[in-house]
Amino acid sequence: MEFDLPAFDGETKELNVIIETAKGRRNKFKYDEKRGLFRLGGVLPAGSVFPYDFGFVPSTQGEDGDPLDVLVLMDEPAFAGCLVPARLIGVIEAEQTERDGKTMHNDRLVAVASEAHTYRDIQSLDDLNDTLLEEIEHFFVSYNAVRGKEFKPTGRAGAAKAKALVREGAKKAGK
């Protein structure tokens, strides 16, 4: 299974997102490029689940060397490996400190699935309730803390910044 997809679909201009972990799941899956499959990457503590589908943008690379992370708002959970066309609505900017003390940018893109009904009118992070955004940020803070890492949200930006990050990530990946 090879994900040789561009970050944006050439015809529709929608963001291509590959889901790794579905909304409501404790199991964290990660795409294993060498084996061409998804593997279990960890299990969240009891009572913790992913608040929305979580995945990556193919043909991109972040500062951490992995494809860019994206949280996708949609009506029902997808499944690991599902391609979800989406519309970027913004980014939660963040710094992440690894167990070895190395700190880097590790932003979380936020998108709406193109086929979503409940979220179809959401065009930017400003359209979301502040409490919901704070809860999403808290999820990433606690998720990383359990793994011995520190995730520190540093700001929020709109769709234009998110698209620029994707374009930058595609260049970094050589795509």
Image (cartoon, rainbow, N blue to C red):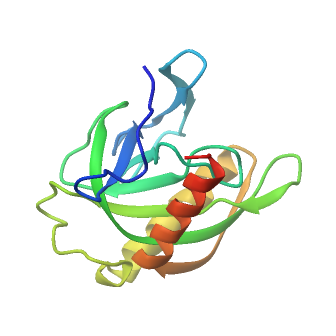
| Residue sitting at x 25%, y 43% | 77
Q: Is residue 165 above or below residue 143?
A: below
Residue 139 placement, left or right of 78: right
Q: Is residue 129 above or below residue 13?
A: below
Q: Which residue is most to the left?
A: 117
Residue 133: % across, % down = 43, 73
Q: In which quadrant of the rendered view does residue 151 lie?
A: bottom right
Residue 170 placement, left or right of 125: right
Nearer the observer, 121 or 151: 121
Nearer the observer, 150 or 89: 89
| Residue sitting at x 51%, y 58% | 139
Residue 35: % across, % down = 56, 15
Nearer the observer, 42 or 60: 60
| Residue sitting at x 52%, y 70% | 164
Q: Which residue is most to the top?
A: 35
| Residue 49 visible in image | no
| Residue 28 visible in image | yes
Q: In which quadrant of the rendered view does residue 135 lie?
A: bottom left
Residue 155: % across, % down = 59, 80
Residue 121: % across, % down = 16, 74
Residue 131 placement, left or right of 68: left
| Residue sitting at x 76%, y 60% | 104
Q: Is residue 67 above or below residue 80?
A: below
